[in-house]
Image (cartoon, helix red, strand yellow):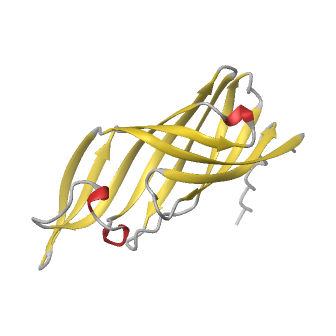
Amino acid sequence: MPEALTEFTGRLECYNLSMGTIEDVVIATTDEGDLIRREWRGPTLSVAVREISDPRLDGRITVWFNSDEYLIASDETPWQLSDVEPEEWPRGVVASTYRLTNADGSWLGSWYQNWYVDGDNSTTTAVYTGEGSYEGLTALMEMDFDELNPVCAWDVHGYVIEGQLPPFPELPAE
């Protein structure tokens, strides 16, 4: 059982993207074009903490991610999401690893995110483990993706927990 909970809220926004590699894999051919899985590997994202109510979560953030985006490709297929309206974005799944660093320590964690065909992104709950002065702390962060900038802006809400999260229950024997 956690010894203490400290609630926090804030806002994160990205400001720099290193592209990584992109490979389009044709899955099927349709009348509209090829159905492809766009495999994006190794990009990094620099994220600024614009505001945060708990100073332990303030600092420099780097996000490493891989994504698989599914779309119908044609000669008009945009290369960047910023070139089209959100409702035209591909569907996909993003796996991310995150490190927030400040003078007192770091937070390291991961999350998955869904991109839906209507341009809506899932709200994601991520678990971060404290390092350095934050050793023994866990941050449970809900990330709500901004409707106006769903790729690079998040409102966050969660808890810093002294100790560990409760364990997942064991499945009963059959």
Looking at the rendering, in which quadrant would you find the N terminus? top right
Q: Residue at x 36, y 51 (%)?
A: 67
Q: Indicate left or right for 63 with 105 as reference.
A: left
The x, y position of residue 49, in whole percent, is 59, 39
The x, y position of residue 162, in whole percent, is 82, 36
The x, y position of residue 147, in whole percent, is 50, 65
Q: Residue at x 28, y 64 (%)?
A: 84
Looking at the rendering, in which quadrant would you find the C terminus? bottom right
Q: Nearer the viewer, residue 7 or 132?
A: 7
Please state the total of marks drawn on the protein image: 0
Give residue 128's quadrant in the image: top right
Q: Nearer the viewer, residue 100 or 152?
A: 152
Image height of 40 relative to 83, above or below: above
Q: Residue at x 90, y 40 (%)?
A: 3
Query: Is residue 157 in view?
Result: yes
Image height of 73 relative to 13, above or below: below
The x, y position of residue 29, in whole percent, is 13, 71
Which residue is situated farthest in the bottom direction here? 31
Q: Nearer the viewer, residue 106 or 48?
A: 48
Which residue is situated farthest in the right direction here? 3
Q: Indicate left or right for 144 with 85 as reference.
A: right
Q: Nearer the viewer, residue 174 or 39?
A: 39
Give residue 127's quadrant in the image: top right
Q: Indicate left or right for 84 with 29 as reference.
A: right
Q: Residue at x 47, y 62 (%)?
A: 148
Query: Is residue 2 in view?
Result: no
